[in-house]
Image: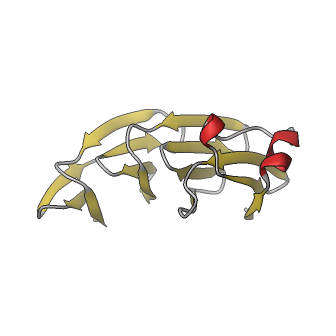
Amino acid sequence: MEIIKRDISEEEFYKLNYPILFENGKYNKRFGVLTIQNDNYAFAWRSELIEPVILKANSYTVCVGVDQNCTLIDVNKKLIERFNLLYNLFDIKLFNDIILIITELEIISVHTIDFKKSNSHPLPDLFEEIIIDNKQITVKCSENTSTVIHF
């Protein structure tokens, strides 16, 4: 599955008739189009210097996130699941069949099969690093704190 992201102008964004993955209303500063196979999706975000995180989770699932937005796309079913995050997105990782939406102060786990949120894992401090092992995840945070998440 080929995934292509391209930046577009604000004017072009509002003229397009593509499904919108996410946007921030009047706070949008950057605009883009994501092409997955032959389908196009538009999105907009407010951070001028931060690029969206794009993860191909499996042969039919793509995750896109930036700022406090994360969207999962099932390209076979044309299903889009949006997550409005409480904290800024840091990264998106895959652990077995679970998508990990990593924010500054929590990790949200979502099943790749049905996009159902399985859990929210609060962090003891600001996220710094994630170490993924066979059956557990160790999250290192600022102030020399850490937490272990078991699956």
Which of these two is toward me, 117 or 50? 50
Q: Quadrant of the N terminus?
A: bottom right
Q: Position of residue 66 (x, y in %)?
A: 53, 52
Which of these two is toward me, 92 or 48? 48
Q: Position of residue 132 (x, y in %)?
A: 31, 64
Q: Is residue 135 left or right of residue 17?
A: left
Q: Is residue 61 left or right of residue 102?
A: right
* Extreme-left residue of the structure: 144
Q: Is residue 5 left or right of residue 119?
A: right
In the rendered image, which quarter is residue 147 located in?
bottom left
Q: Position of residue 49 (x, y in %)?
A: 55, 64
Can residue 80 be seen by looking at this rendering? Answer: yes
Total number of numbered discs in the rendering:
0
Q: Residue at x 27, y 42 (%)?
A: 121
Q: How does the figure colour the protein chain or chains?
A: secondary structure
Q: Is residue 15 left or right of residue 116?
A: right
Q: From the viewer's perspective, is residue 132 above or below residue 47?
A: below
Q: Residue at x 64, y 37 (%)?
A: 26
Q: From the viewer's perspective, is residue 46 above or below residue 48?
A: above
Q: Position of residue 78 (x, y in %)?
A: 74, 38
Can residue 75 be seen by looking at this rendering? Answer: no
In the rendered image, which quarter is residue 27 located in?
top right
Q: From the viewer's perspective, is residue 113 above or below residue 12?
A: above
